[in-house]
Amino acid sequence: MSGTSAEPTILIESLVKRYPNSSVKAVDGIDLDVHHGEIFGLLGPNGAGKTTTIGVCTTRVIATSGRVRVVGIDVGGDPARVKQFIGVVTQYSTLDRSLTALENLIFHARYFGAGARDAKRRAEILLERFRLKDASMRLPDELSGGMAQRLQIARAIGHGPKVLFLDEPTAGLDPQSRLSLWELVRQLRDEGTTILLTTHNMEEADELCDRIAIIDHGRILVCDTPERLKQQTTTKTEIHLDFPEPPHGLLKALRELPGIDSAVAVPEGIRILASGQNGLLQRVVEAAHGHALQHVSVKTPTLETVFIELTGRALRD
Amino acid sequence: MTDILNIARGGRLGIYVRAFIGLLARDVRVLRRDFIPFLLRTVMNPVMFTFVFAYVLPKIGEGFHGGGAADFGTILVPGLMAVAMIFQGIAAVALPLVNEFGRTREIEDRIMAPLPVAGVAIEKIVFGAMQSIVAALVVFPVVAVIPAAPVSVHVASWPLLIVVLLLASLISGAFGLTIGTLFRPQQVPLIFSIIVVPVTFLGCVYYPWQLLDPLPVLRYAVLVNPVVYISEGLRAALTPDVPHMHPAAFLSAMLVLLTILGSAALRLFLRRVTG
């Protein structure tokens, strides 16, 4: 493989993508490096540019400008070679609907040069490992969401890629399938695979990723470990007040309280970010007196808090 | 377990060739599973055509005549083969591709195979071409059995037949790929009404091109239709007594068409893939 050992596994420099017939840039000057053996997460709302960034890294989207190198190979210059070293799981199922689960794995290995017998052996090992043995003869449309997603990942690593790209890998999965998928991704990381994933789920980013970049409107806002990002917030406490209907005049009163940085209306009631702590909760509850307050929750800062501080919006707003 | 497949062996070309063979093997596997539908769509058209035009109509005394001394069954054979070939390009390449692009997006998996995207497109053309040759050959047993009067088909020139079949099959594959990248799943019925029907009816299938003399506008207008050259080429190779174009004319036209359709198909395919 070309490139020096010091070079990051994925290197993105000044990446810009503007789709034809679009006035805005889907990706607007991204710089990023992902190191060998880490799980790196791109966290952001829908439409932030995450999928486009992965699309460029995986040769499926052509960059407007900028440079992307994966395992030392220029993605724009030699896409066919990059494809040898990467595995991709897209947001939607790209399983071959005409082939059984077993055949999906067999033919994937064959595309990557395995002989017929070797491909079958590999496919069987993968089915075993991903707990899909009972489904080996089923067509993709007959698999549950969790099974189909496991099959997609099994297929993506079938040729032993150095880098695995996962675009919203757990979107639409039930909580149990999500947890087992996280476990799988960690195992792959521990085996030395570098993983770049996108998510708009802050819990996933927090639990699973070694480092994350928060991305919005095609730009990276911050990039660090989840721990450090949470420590760097000026917010020390996030308070949620739930009301059956929007309370009149309360927002203004809350904003005037000392120690409160922001108070905004959200669908359930009011969200407060506060940097002061002593006696704050009592003052907030007193201020809400007479407004039919239903529920109060107090949280330490999460990645969601980080995102709100940076953009003024919640991830799902 | 994730031992890395030693794909680098054999160098870059070796990797491409193995990926290409893998893609072809996948298509053959799917075809084997769907063999009965494949057989039906391949056989039905020539059987029905031959039955109605070369059996029913002559029996009830309503047969067409044209092309000098040759009977209609004989005129029909190359035309039927041409239609079978071009239709196979649509059925085997265009229709699956419309779905894979528009509905299931499963084409994205094959795009990630370690070869240039153009290689994936060329594999589609080659696989379509293979089926199209099978479809052409199926016509022989059909016309040997069904017609009321025996058809007179003999290979006048094997090299010519082979060249015509090869060019025609690749044109069919490229034609199918072009259509497959242009239409969305909801527009599939449109493929039949605005593509299949006109290229079939105006493809010199039921009459040799020379006989269009009295209709000069039509005679030259149909020259954009690839089926015309396939019919005429097969006529020259199989039924040389029926009037047909000069080989230099249809061969060069087929080469030009293949170049145009092939490059259009590749360009459209790349555009769909990397938006």
Image: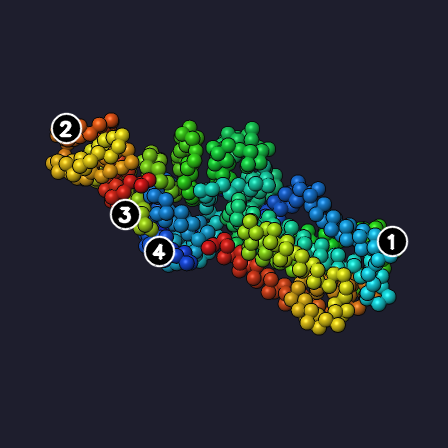
The tally of labels here is 4
Comparing labels 3 and 4, the label whose residue is closer to the camera: 4
Dot 4 and dot 1 within a common chain: no
Dot 3 and dot 4 within a common chain: yes
In screen coordinates, is B135 left or right of B104? right
3D distance between C-alphas at marks 3 and 4: 18 Å
- Chain letter, disc 4 residue: A
Tell me the SS state at disc 2.
helix
In screen coordinates, is A185 left or right of B185? left
Q: Residue at x 33, y 54 (%)?
A: A28
Of label 3 and label 4, which has the lower sequence position?
A: 4
> How dense is the environment of label 2, judged by Cα within 10 Å: few (below 14), some, or many (20 and up)?
few
Of B102 and B58, the residue lying toward us? B58
Callout 1 touching callout 2 (CB < 8 Å) = no
Tell me the SS state at disc 4.
loop
3D distance between C-alphas at marks 1 and 2: 101 Å
Kind of residue at badge 4: Val
- Residue beneath disc 2: A286
| Numbered tag placed on residue B59 in the rendering | 1
Tell me the SS state at disc 1.
helix
Q: Residue at x 74, y 61 (%)?
A: B205
- Residue beneath disc 3: A221
